[in-house]
Amino acid sequence: MPPGEPVQGSSEGRPPLPFREIVDAATDGVAIIEVVDGADSSPQLLFRHLNPRACELLGLEASALDGVDVDTASPGLARHGILQSAAALRLEVNDRWSMEPGRTLDMRAGTFAGYVALRFRDVTNTERLEESERESRARLEAILASINDAFIVLDRDWRLSYLNEEAARILRRPLSDLWGGAIWDELPFLRDTDFERQLLHASHDSVDITFETRHPIDPDTWLSVRAYPSEVGLTVSLRDVSNDRRVASHAAEMQRATSLGTLAGGIAHDFNNLLMVLQGHTEFLANDLGPGHPSAEHLEAIHAAAARAEDLTGQLLAYSQHQMVLPTRVDLNSVIDASSARLRNRAGESVTVLIDLADAAVTVEVDPRELVQSVAYLVDNACDAMPDGGRLVIRVARVSIPDSAVTVPNLPAGDFGVIELTDSGMGMTTDVRAHAAEPFFTHGRHGDRTGLGLSAADGIAKQAGGWLEIDSEVDVGTVVRIFLPCRDGDDDDDRDRDRDDDDRDDDVEVPASALLEPTSLSSADPPPSSAVDPNRTRSILVVDDNPNLRELIARLLSEQGYRVDTAADGPAAIALATSRSTPFDLLVTDVVMPGLSGFDLAAALVVDEHGPAVLFMSGFTDRARLAQPASFTARDFIAKPFRATEMAQAVERLLAERDARLGPVTP
């Protein structure tokens, strides 16, 4: 049979097709196919009618199709198989046919009275939109999955229609278990919480809500939540802000600590001046009355109380990190060894103190006086933890901390010198240990102590670039470690490397024993009387903005036989010095003063080698605005409050050194 020729005799007696007018008017393509028995008993499919839209979609002419085999007229449709499936199964079959690139037909086939009715619909644009929507959704899901915030979409029935992996992590449930479930059924722990109340408010009142709340099953976790209504229900974003809150809390604590430190430093400075006046006049009175006077014991009690107050102000200054420090390269072994007798005396007879030094030198840069005082505070704490006596081991070691081992923010890696104090005392609970280094913290077993010891030691360590570490176990004991950066010769910074050769000669490691008491004479110093010309009265200029303290020092030096002038500040001192024909022999100046600092005043008066020797005094410095000159050393400084004998010794030494440098001086 030639292609396109109708099948003969197959339509004889065939009734007319019903609803032909309705079919032809349809906007979808409709084809009516007759199912007849073929020669090989397989059904043969013959076109009987196509409405205009079907002809357009299939690219066929309706007038030439009546009785034509589908396989002949439209091989692609025949190969698709939808007609065969409908005819064989006598069921309605739905499918899509990509008949050519870029064109897709949606088809539905059903049978009736020996016919198959096939409906066509061009869904090319629809499919493109669906594909675009799928791609957009996939991109959106990829974006939501990649960001750190958690997202949840709740439909109007409060079902979880969407959530990302971060949301599942925060909610502590597998993603597959949550998708599609009702939020209150899948996450019952959200019931009767602020989370539920806020979401209901956002949904019922159609308002955006932003709030922070604790995680219902993890109190250590804080969530920032934003809920806002949408057409599909409610969209919720969640963010774990626990670390942000910890950082903010730490910053607030640091701010409070800084404010408290500034206050403590200022109070300590004022108290130091008062103590200087109190101790000075007590010493004058004791000298006037003599040792056998009935009031001598009262003066001794005043002196002891002043000494205790001096120790307290020292702790306040150490905590505030506003004390004058004179960092020097020293060996920790030498520092601890030189102060071992003092530390043992501080511990008392009931505590056995063992010293374990490192095998090799452990060089750090620190003010040795402050470091020994820090260790003394820790000895006090250890002894308080052993009221019935015990054992205290003070150990010096060198440790290396690699980058991978640094777990605390802002702590460096590298080589560190460590002073470790291990006691056999009662130990601390976790809560007590967490607050142990806070100022004024005490838990009732320290007697009359202020609770500043650990915080003072911590402040001294931080000022030297290190830190304090505490390990403790109840009924076992406590270990406190002071970490200080090692300062070996190969680790000098660029400033050190750029010094002149003469300056390098002066940059030597000073024995710790010579620095622990810088205001007293060491055995290596020549006796002052051998260098000072006894026939000439030395002139001294005393500068301090505190009038009581200024007059006290002036009286002290006058009684030592010096000619003393005083000034209340830097400009007055400069005016007094320039009015003289010869320079003062010695300038004794406070470091922190209104206007010119003591360092600036010294720079103005000491213009050549004939200028005065300088003795700086201080009990408090604001390091943020006060820079120490490079030549400033421990031998140029006396810490407030000081004893009259300490001042006298320091003055004699500096005058003797000046005379030895300038040679014989004419009276």
Image (tube, rainbow, N blue to C red):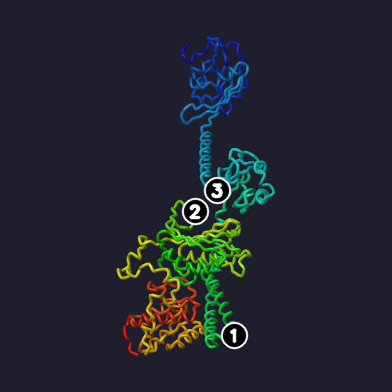
Q: Is residue 641 left or right of residue 179?
A: left
503 over 662 or under it: above or below: above
Q: To which residue does mark 2 refer?
A: 407
Q: Position of residue 51 (x, y in %)?
A: 56, 24
Q: How many marks?
A: 3
Q: Mark 2 to mark 1: distance in Å?
A: 59 Å
Q: To which residue does mark 3 refer?
A: 149
Mark 3 or mark 1, earlier in chain: 3
Decide: few, some or many residues near mark 3? Use Cα within 10 Å; few <14, some 14-19, many ≥20: some
- Furthest residue toward left: 501
Residue depicted at 55% across the width and 54% down the height: 243
Residue depicted at 58% across the width and 40% down the height: 175
User: Looking at the picture, which amino acid does disc 3 mark?
Assistant: Asp
Residue 133 vs residue 330, the one in the foreground: 330
Q: Position of residue 509 (x, y in %)?
A: 38, 67
Q: Mark 2 to mark 3: distance in Å?
A: 25 Å
User: Looking at the picture, which amino acid does disc 1 mark?
Assistant: Ser
Decide: few, some or many residues near mark 2? Use Cα within 10 Å; few <14, some 14-19, many ≥20: few
Residue 663 vs residue 356, the one in the foreground: 356
Residue depicted at 52% across the width and 47% down the height: 147
For label 1, the SS is: loop
Q: Mark 3 to mark 1: distance in Å?
A: 76 Å
User: Looking at the picture, which amino acid does disc 2 mark?
Assistant: Thr
Q: Is residue 389 left or right of residue 628?
A: right
For label 2, the SS is: loop
Mark 2 or mark 3, earlier in chain: 3
Mark 2 or mark 1, earlier in chain: 1
Eye-nearest disc, 2 or 1: 1
Q: To which residue does mark 1 refer?
A: 295
